[in-house]
Image: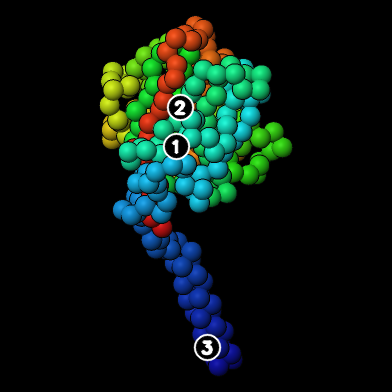
Amino acid sequence: MNKLFQTITLCSVIILSACSKESMNAQTPTPTTPTQPTTPVVYSFESTPIWSDEFDYQGLPDTKKWNYDVGGSGWGNNELQYYTKENLKNARVENGKLIIEAVKEKFDKNSYTSARLVTKGKGDFLYGRFEIKAKLPKGIGTWPAIWMLASEQNYSDKYWPDNGEIDIMEHVGYDPGRVHASIHTKSFNHVIGTQVTANTMVDDFDMAFHEYRLDWTPKKIEMYIDSKLYFTFENTGKGFAEFPFDKKFHLLLNLAVGGNWGGVKGVDESIFPQRMEVDYVRIYALKQ
């Protein structure tokens, strides 16, 4: 009987001890590792261009780097020029500069000729720093542009604006000195009045060369003139309709005449020929 009582007592002590340990374990909080603050990503660019044209040659633009858009159908903006191909009158390199020149002359059904150079197929880029040093034309009816378009239709069969457009520099001659930067997407474009744009004054736009620059990263698009920031568009994270700028784009350089914007106040026929001159194009890769 005593042995039985001792055995029962011992078992009770063991059970109570186990329950006590379980209770202590349940009440003791599990240590947690403090949450570390997220370090924001800081993007930078390589110091040596991955693609460039210094225009240190003579004659037609380098065919290893440049293609031409050709035609005179108005280009969606009711423009008046015909863009020619491999025509020294409209696009040539001389004295270390690329010359894109609009000339008043009959060509096909158009009253002007000019050129639109593109890097598509010879220079297609995803992110980077783009530097173009240029001197702009003047006079009512001129519409020079330095800009970018998607190289492929990744997001929609509707090429524009669903796949995006980046305008590094636009200038319309009836508003001299006011330089514009813009982006166009499915959600943000001028057709529906939602375009995202900014402008700044460059008083000697037609007398001096200025560097027009785009910094393009997965996070945002920024535009500069002579290293001064004046336009920022951040990635909203809401998909391609707002930020389709995560696919390859190519560069365009052109000088249009008239059109829905350039021709708002008509065209002064007496000012032609007019030219945009480009000192260099330099493109730097985003550092990985």
Please name the residue that numbered disc 2 is placed on.
101
Left or right, 1 with respect to 213, comes to right
Q: Is residue 72 left or right of residue 26?
A: right
Q: Which residue is rendered at x = 55% and y = 19% of the image?
A: 105
Choose between 124 and 189: the one closer to the eye.
124
Q: Amino acid at mark 2?
A: Glu
Q: Secondary structure at mark 2?
A: strand
- Image: 38 above or below 15: above
Q: Residue 89's spot in the image, x, y percent?
A: 48, 30
Residue 8 vertical placement versus 52 (above, below): below
Q: Is residue 249 left or right of residue 76?
A: left
Secondary structure of the residue carrying tag 3 is helix
* Lower position in the chain sequence, tag 1 or tag 3: 3
Query: What residue is disc 1 on?
Result: 92
Q: Name the foreground residue: 256 vs 187.
A: 256
Residues at badges 2 and 1 in contact (C-beta under 8 Å)? yes
Number of numbered tags placed on the structure image:
3
Q: Amino acid at mark 3?
A: Gln
Q: Residue at x 54, y 38 (%)?
A: 86
Q: Nearer the viewer, residue 49 or 43?
A: 49
* Residue drawn at x 46%, y 68% as measured from the top left: 25
Residue denoted by label 3:
6
Looking at the picture, tell me which residue is in the foreground, 221 or 226: 226
